[in-house]
Image (cartoon, rainbow, N blue to C red):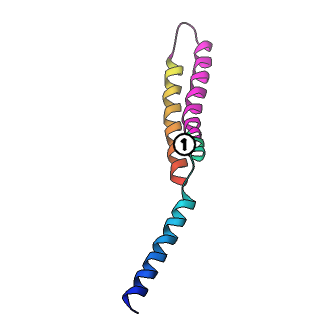
Amino acid sequence: MDEREKLRRSIERQAKRMEQAEQDRSTLLSQTAFLGVLALLLVVPVILGAYLGRWLDTLSEGYSIHWTVSLIIVGVIVGIFNVYLFVREH
């Protein structure tokens, strides 16, 4: 095999890789959707924890935010774990 044949095959291989990379490139819309899903996975457990904690605090006598703060922290931990699992899967 001469040098021209090696060069031609190398250029063809690089061209195929470039075409494949162009096809695999994600669009702005798909990146925005991905970030939106990540935000929902993080925020929803925090909001649910806040509402549940506030409801539990209203059941107790006097002014208390013990359950609210505790469940917000739990919501943050659950949200981070959700994001981690989602990103690891994709």
Q: Is residue 40 above or below residue 9?
A: above
x and y, in percent, of residue 59 in the image: 62, 14
Task: Give the quarter of the image for residue 7.
Answer: bottom left
- Kindly identify the residue that appears in the image at 43 percent across and 87 percent down: 5
- Kindly identify the residue that appears in the image at 54 percent across and 42 percent down: 82
Q: Which residue lies most toward the left here? A: 3
Q: Is residue 58 above or below residue 77?
A: above
Q: Which residue lies most toward the bottom here? A: 1
**In this rendering, position of residue 2 left or right of residue 23:** left
x and y, in percent, of residue 74 in the image: 51, 31
Q: Nearer the viewer, residue 62 or 68?
A: 68
- Kindly identify the residue that appears in the image at 49 percent across and 76 percent down: 12
Q: How many marks?
A: 1
**In this rendering, position of residue 87 left or right of residue 33:** left
Q: Secondary structure at mark 1?
A: helix
Task: Give the quarter of the image for residue 89.
Answer: bottom right
x and y, in percent, of residue 62 in the image: 54, 6
Q: Nearer the viewer, residue 33 or 3?
A: 3
Instruction: Inspect the image, locate mark 1, and give the three-letter code of the amino acid beneath it.
Output: Asn
- Kindly identify the residue that appears in the image at 54 percent across and 66 percent down: 20
- The secondary structure that most of the magenta stretch takes on is helix
Q: Which residue lies most toward the top here? A: 62
Residue numbers of the magenta segment: 36-65
Q: Residues within 10 Å of mark 1 (few under 14, many from 20)?
A: some
Residue at mark 1: 82
